[in-house]
Image (cartoon, rainbow, N blue to C red):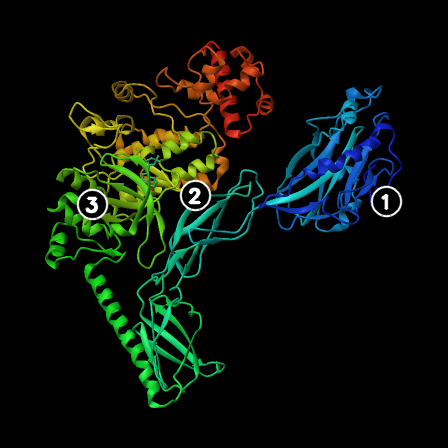
Amino acid sequence: MGPRGTGGRAGRAGAPAPGWTCLLPLLLCTALRSLRASPGSEVNLLDSRTVMGDLGWIAYPKNGWEEIGEVDENYAPIHTYQVCKVMEQNQNNWLLTSWISNEGASRIFIELKFTLRDCNSLPGGLGTCKETFNMYYFESDDEDGRNIKENQYIKIDTIAADESFTELDLGDRVMKLNTEVRDVGPLTKKGFYLAFQDVGACIALVSVRVYYKKCPSVIRNLARFPDTITGADSSQLLEVSGVCINHSVTEEAPKMHCSAEGEWLVPIGKCLCKAGYEEKNNTCQAPSPVSSVKKGKITKNSISLSWQEPDRPNGIILEYEIKYFEKDQETSYTIIKSKETAITADGLKPGAAYVFQIRARTAAGYGGFSRRFEFETSPVLAASSDQSQIPIIVVSVTVGVILLAVVIGFLLSGRRCGYSKAKQDPEEEKMHFHNGHIKLPGVRTYIDPHTYEDPNQAVHEFAKEIEASCITIERVIGAGEFGEVCSGRLKLQGKREFPVAIKTLKVGYTEKQRRDFLGEASIMGQFDHPNIIHLEGVVTKSKPVMIVTEYMENGSLDTFLKKNDGQFTVIQLVGMLRGIASGMKYLSDMGYVHRDLAARNILINSNLVCKVSDFGLSRVLEDDPEAAYTTRGGKIPIRWTAPEAIAFRKFTSASDVWSYGIVMWEVMSYGERPYWEMTNQDVIKAVEEGYRLPSPMDCPAALYQLMLDCWQKDRNSRPKFDEIVSMLDKLIRNPSSLKTLVNASSRVSNLLVEHSPVGSGAYRSVGEWLEAIKMGRYTEIFMENGYSSMDAVAQVTLEDLRRLGVTLVGHQKKIMNSLQEMKVQLVNGMVPL
Ligand code: ACK
């Protein structure tokens, strides 16, 4: 018989449960206090713990599930249902929830918290006792679906306990609360019922939480992304378009992807504040209010005022608006507009108080009004009163003159914190175009700074000069070929201070070193793309000479990946690769060949946005420790470089594509060294003979195929960067295409040399094996838990790993795949375990 509406409502204080089962509720409060609140991206549709009144659930038959009347420490009811018919045959006890609206979500999650009695600990109940129960659902658009039959419910799963409890546990008052989560989808109706079927277990269902996941509304890259309910498919990524926030415009259409887990992934594109607006805390605002207003000369009919430019003008101030009115007469006010930072309001009443407010206007519009400033005109008095103004006038005039002198001096000395561009001789500008670099509308091409007779001219053509006093160096973060790399802050006039990276040129440099050092800025300054490191400017007029760029919180990509081994989802890794490909597409469109594309030359910020960096002038790669001299004398990073570029220096965007393939490999293997410890000569030889790097572990087949395409011997057969970007976009839009991984056996058969970190050799110890797969941190735990030989390790299951405390999914995968691989090799007779 089905669970019908005729069934009895589960009694709040049912008949006392037999024997030990009545002990269950006593332990619930302690366990309940530890229940976790729902995280931000989860939206509860039902939480039995927070329902104050009757839940309205139905038990069928009446003597099956029963509700225990318990309260928590705040005397709020705890809706706990229990059933324990372990001694009786053929149990079929149903508990039906009331109708639950899915609020438009097409995939919902059900979190159950329950305790379950261990059958082995039951005297005589072994024959009939069960240790599982079943969960079902039935979809319906309204509440009429309750009278449906048992067999119309769709089974979600059989629920078993990770930990069941025994009599002993009851004695110790230890509550083994199990948490199980299941998800259901796609849902097509407006709501659903859940049902729990007991077939003879001893269960206390402590709480039921039903929720869906969403990617919460967020502003990223100045674009607003709305609350987005995750997709129906557990691996689906929803592409969501962002809308530029007020006062900003699209640079590249902003998009993000909402994952089934409710995380925003793979940000693409961005908005920029309109001219005159400044980016601050994810907003764009016009000029800040005038903050300091001083009174000047005051007579019986006039008040003179002066003020300072707002702290953050955010553009050129076109004029000020001064509003004033007699105190308490706000409805009747006067407005004066002034281009100066001083005015005189006249025609005022003698001896009256006036209120002044000032605001500035830039091309972006008016900023906010200043606070109110109150000043009084002089009263009408005898002639002597005007005498009393003389000292004020004298002081004001003196202060005014001094101020004027300071301002003029300041302007003349050019020591304002702002950018200054070297003045361009029109002749020179002409020459520049005569050099063959005529810019076609809409097509920007890269100009090789070498084409300038004077490299200093190139720097000032493409890079803004920054006053050294605007830079605060905070700490050294690394060493470059020319000097230290530091992090610090840059405060430009009219802009808020922001973090920057500062490359310095060490003292005692030669003229050539200075030229080469600044050459990078001449190149970088020509680029403007979200995936290319942004140049803020250069310091050339004082020492040390510096190049100032945007700050990338996570530093270089190879180090970052090594530090966070196994910790990203495939989509996050593909997002990084997409960014790099997009930056490279921009460079190749500009006609710039990078020649040293490698993960060490990619920087990554706190949003995991990757940007191409390292634009050496000579591109003979003096500063790359990976670069080695070839027989022809050039210095080349062999492992990253296409064969034609190594052999006859044919560097093109197609050779950059080869390097990009190597970067893909580095990213997917979390910063592994390409070709491991092979010598450069062996790498050149192996590649020439047609060998290629094997697929990294856990690598989607589509990505490995793309790598192989990038490593085509014939450079014309390699994909172009725009094709790579489109391909990665397609994979991101359709993440199920990333599910097919390169299988372990084909991965091994692709090995170009025997030297592989995983699976290519018999490991002498568990420690050696774990070290080889970069999981050395778990060696002690393995040893302590009896996995001290490779034979023992071969038996490890995923459950065992979790028990050992290997909780990171990436690490679990790495270990399990390595084991799987070793087993495959064993079967193939390739490597003895
Ligand atoms: O891996 P890292 O921390 O990232 O160490 C190197 C070091 O300086 C020498 O190049 C770091 N670095 C270079 N440019 C930047 C930047 N724009 N933002 C943050 N770190 C940077 C790089």
- Residue type at numbered disc 1: Thr
Mark 3, residue position: 543
Question: Dot 3: within a 10 Å radius of its alpha carbon, few (fewer than 14), some, or many (20 or more) residues?
Answer: few
Residue 629: percent from left, percent from top: 19, 25
State the residue in front, 585 or 38. Answer: 38
- Give the Cα distance between marks 2 and 3: 34 Å
- Residue type at numbered disc 2: Asn
- Give the Cα distance between marks 2 and 1: 56 Å
Residue 229: percent from left, percent from top: 57, 48
Q: Please tell me whether residue 388 is drawn above or below residue 805 in the rendered image.
A: below
Residue 764: percent from left, percent from top: 46, 10
Report helix, strand or loop for mark 3: loop
Q: Residue at x 42, y 15 (%)?
A: 760
Name the side, left or right, on which 658 lies relative to 828. left
Mark 2, residue position: 607
Quadrant (top left, top right, bottom left, bottom right) of the N terminus: top right
Say if mark 2 contacts mark 3, CB within 8 Å.
no
State the residue in front, 181 or 703. Answer: 181
Residue at the right extreme, as displayed: 15
Name the side, left or right, on which 590 lies relative to 572. left
Q: Residue at x 37, y 35 (%)?
A: 557
Mark 1, residue position: 6
Residue at the front extreme, as displayed: 384
Q: Quadrant of residue 717?
A: top left
State which tag comes first along the sequence, 3 or 1.
Answer: 1
